[in-house]
């Protein structure tokens, strides 16, 4: 489903002293099946943007068009729409509530109206997607480690097989290996099901490595959007938004100061960079 | 969480905001009692005027006071209806085949409605203009004579301030969990009462778990910073009675005298 934000504004607590304009005249489009990263520092409006997309907030003004669905300030009955969108919130392990891991993962598919066999199939599948061993299925989710709890929570969303998967800082609070692992799961899931992924992060490395499109936000506005190369080429823009280029790009830039033929800064994956360097070394430059 | 909560502190600056919390507490408490002594149009008009003056002095938009009335609107409607139907003395005002409304019923309904509105106005004035910390400091100071009977005043005030401190946090947490479960297809808006109540289980369990976790973390953090209760504990901000506080209590004395002179 093609997603387009058309002149969207969102204001919290309208008409009180706590009034706060979180989004201002947002115009942005995401292509069907693309992996989009929304980046920006704390308070830039990224979370509000994805909550609108999830149908959990209604825009104060403007229209959000998702496929055939139009969401505006007076939209009602978004229940059906929400079933097509999966959201992994920050610290999703705080939403677990069932007695067993399997029951918790089954909550979403059950709400979708799947039959028992289908639910069972999806639970098993989701557990294998996130790398949870099948013998954990009858354990209480609260006995698990933090990292495992997060996997259960994410499996609960993946089991809904959403057309649009929203991830709000999914790697926050995980150690480096946990982060790498989760990112590769998300990447494979995206490629396998072809769903549109909207990934909110302030980690440039994640955004550069995974995203096909980056949306750069600051103070409730979309500052810039485009392919990672286009975004990270424009250093001053990023610094105004309080952000930086990915570590890989920084490393290539400092390496390039000592090279006569610079390495391309369009490389964002470590393995691709390693290949490039080996290639050069073999050529003897 | 798009609306201001009932009784939430509104952090602006006004004469009422700057008053000592103790004098505000005493004033509002006495006012609430005074409301029950008013018994004719003049005395109610006086109290309504005081309430209105308070709203103006607080520099808080009338809209917020109006919104806080939403909480009691059903109580007002219910008691009004109750009195109109069941109070049967005085002359009949309206006669219909099914129901006769008597003068006394109308009078009682009006009195109770005005009382509810006055109670809510004064309570809102206190809550809107006093920060939770000031409020508990004030209460601790007002209750301190109870120490003589070994009542744990400090611990009581600390408990209250922690409870107040966590209302917005838990509210935000609830909002987040509701959204997360909605995103997983939970339906809170349809079905009969039983189904709707059951729909909140996926919200209540995570909320309870996180409350316990927060409580434990807070207790550890307090202990780590050497908190041992109220014994020998000093205060950073010392409350002081100023001229304006005396003025407030003088105002109350005048209002109270006027009211007792006005009532029949």
Image (tube, coloured by chain):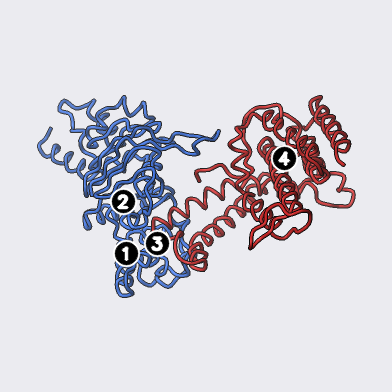
Q: Are marks 4 and 1 in contact (CB under 8 Å)?
A: no
Q: Is residue A232 above or below residue A102?
A: above
Figure quadrant of residue B89: bottom right
Callout 4 and callout 2 share a chain: no
Instruction: Determine which residue is flagged by label 2.
Output: A183
Distance of label 4 from label 3 (alpha carbons)? 49 Å
**In this rendering, which labeled residue sits more in front, label 4 or label 3?**
4
Instruction: Determine which residue is flagged by label 1.
Output: A126
Q: Which chain is red?
A: B
Instruction: Determine which residue is flagged by label 4.
Output: B122
Q: Quadrant of the C terminus of chain B?
A: top right
Callout 4 and callout 1 share a chain: no
Distance of label 1 from label 2 (alpha carbons)? 15 Å
Residue in front for this viewpoint, B22 or A237? B22
Dot 2: within a 10 Å radius of its alpha carbon, few (fewer than 14), some, or many (20 or more) residues? Answer: some
Secondary element at image label 2: helix
Distance of label 3 from label 2 (alpha carbons)? 15 Å
Distance of label 4 from label 2 (alpha carbons)? 55 Å
């Amino acid at each position: 489903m093609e997603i387009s934000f058309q002149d969207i504004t969102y204001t919290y607590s309208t008409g009180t002293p706590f009034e706060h304009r979180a989004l201002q005249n947002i115009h942005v489009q995401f292509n069907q099946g693309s992996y989009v990263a929304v980046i920006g520092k704390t308070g830039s409006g990224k979370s509000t943007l994805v909550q609108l997309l999830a149908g959990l907030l209604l825009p104060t003004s403007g229209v959000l068009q998702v496929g055939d669905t139009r969401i505006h300030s007076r939209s009602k009955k978004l229940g059906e729409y929400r079933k097509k969108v999966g959201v992994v919130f920050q610290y999703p392990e705080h939403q677990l509530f069932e007695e067993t891991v399997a029951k918790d993962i089954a909550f979403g598919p059950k709400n979708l109206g799947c039959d028992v066999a289908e639910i069972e199939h999806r639970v098993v599948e989701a557990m294998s997607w996130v790398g949870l061993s099948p013998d954990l299925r009858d354990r209480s989710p609260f006995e698990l480690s933090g990292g495992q709890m997060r996997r259960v929570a994410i499996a609960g969303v993946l089991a809904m097989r959403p057309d649009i998967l929203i991830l709000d800082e999914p790697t926050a609070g995980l150690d480096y290996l946990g982060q790498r692992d989760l990112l590769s799961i998300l990447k494979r899931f995206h490629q396998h099901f072809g769903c549109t992924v909207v990934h909110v992060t302030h980690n440039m490395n994640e955004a550069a490595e995974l995203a096909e499109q980056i949306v750069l936000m600051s103070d409730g506005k979309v500052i810039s959007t485009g392919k990672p190369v286009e975004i990270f080429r424009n250093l001053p823009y990023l610094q105004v938004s309080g952000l930086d280029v990915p570590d890989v790009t920084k490393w290539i830039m400092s390496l390039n100061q000592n090279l006569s033929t610079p390495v391309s800064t369009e490389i964002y994956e470590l393995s691709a960079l390693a290949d490039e360097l080996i290639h050069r070394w073999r050529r003897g430059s | 969480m798009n609306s201001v909560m009932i009784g939430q502190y509104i952090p602006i600056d006004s004469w009422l905001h700057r008053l000592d919390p103790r004098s505000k507490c005493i004033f509002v408490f006495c006012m609430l009692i005074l409301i029950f002594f008013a018994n004719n149009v003049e005395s109610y008009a006086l109290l309504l005027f005081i309430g209105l003056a308070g709203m103006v002095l607080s520099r808080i938009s009338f809209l917020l006071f109006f919104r806080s009335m939403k909480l009691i609107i059903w109580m007002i409607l219910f008691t009004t209806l109750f009195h109109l139907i069941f109070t049967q003395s005085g002359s009949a005002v309206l006669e219909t085949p099914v129901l006769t409304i008597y003068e006394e019923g109308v009078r009682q309904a009006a009195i109770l409605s005005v009382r509810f509105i006055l109670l809510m106005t004064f309570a809102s004035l206190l809550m809107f203009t006093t920060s939770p910390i000031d409020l508990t400091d004030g209460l601790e100071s007002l209750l301190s004579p109870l120490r003589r009977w070994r009542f744990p005043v400090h611990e009581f005030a600390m408990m209250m301030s922690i409870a107040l401190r966590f209302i917005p946090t838990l509210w935000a947490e609830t909002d987040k969990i509701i959204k997360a479960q909605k995103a997983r297809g939970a339906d809170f808006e349809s079905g009969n009462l039983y189904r709707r109540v059951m729909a909140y289980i996926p919200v209540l369990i995570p909320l309870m778990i996180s409350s316990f976790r927060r409580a434990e973390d807070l207790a550890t953090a307090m202990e780590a910073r050497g908190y041992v209760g109220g014994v020998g504990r000093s205060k950073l901000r010392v409350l002081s009675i100023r001229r304006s506080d005396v003025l407030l209590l003088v105002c109350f004395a005048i209002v109270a005298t006027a009211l007792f002179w006005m009532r029949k």
